[in-house]
């Protein structure tokens, strides 16, 4: 089975905007939102510290 390239399967809107505060471990971070602080999943833990 061949998959064609360049086809958009799904587009997701952002849930909320926030400020990254801390990286607890490879996949868990802390973000400050308008209504408080939240623990978030970091999907791609590659070079996060260099990018932020």
Image: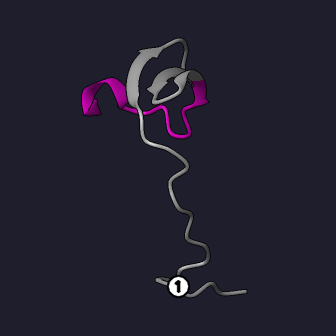
- In this view, 36 is above or below 44: above
How many marks the image carries: the answer is: 1
Residue drawn where x is 73% and y is 86% of the image: 1
The magenta segment: 39-52
Residue plotted at (61% across, 77% down): 9
- Please give the name of the residue rendered at 65% of the width and 87% of the height, measured from the top-left corner: 2
In percent of width and height, residue 40 lies at: 59, 29
Visual colour scheme: one colour
In the rendered view, does 33 fall on the left or right side of 11?
left
Residue occupying image coordinates x 47% and y 24%: 31
Residue 17's spot in the image, x, y percent? 43, 41
| Image x and y of residue 50, in percent | 26, 27
Q: Which residue is mark 1?
A: 7
List x then y, in percent, for residue 30.
51, 19
For the residue carrying disc 1, how many other residues have a C-alpha within 10 Å: few (<14), some (14-19), or many (20+)?
few
> Foreground residue, 11 or 17?
17
Quarter of the figure that contains the C terminus: top left
Kindly state the secondary structure of the residue where label 1 is placed: loop
Which of the 4 image quarters holds residue 20?
Answer: top left
> Magenta stretch: residue 43 in it?
yes
The relative height of residue 1 versus residue 52 in the rendered view (above or below) is: below
Residue 26 is inside the magenta segment: no
Pick the front one: 6 or 31: 31
Most extreme residue toward the right is 1
The outermost residue toward the front is 35
């Amino acid at each position: 089975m061949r998959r064609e390239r360049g086809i958009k399967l799904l587009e997701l809107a952002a849930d909320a905007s926030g400020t990254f505060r801390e990286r607890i471990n490879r996949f868990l971070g802390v973000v400050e939102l308008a209504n408080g602080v939240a623990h978030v999943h970091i999907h791609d833990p590659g070079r996060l510290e260099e990018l932020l």
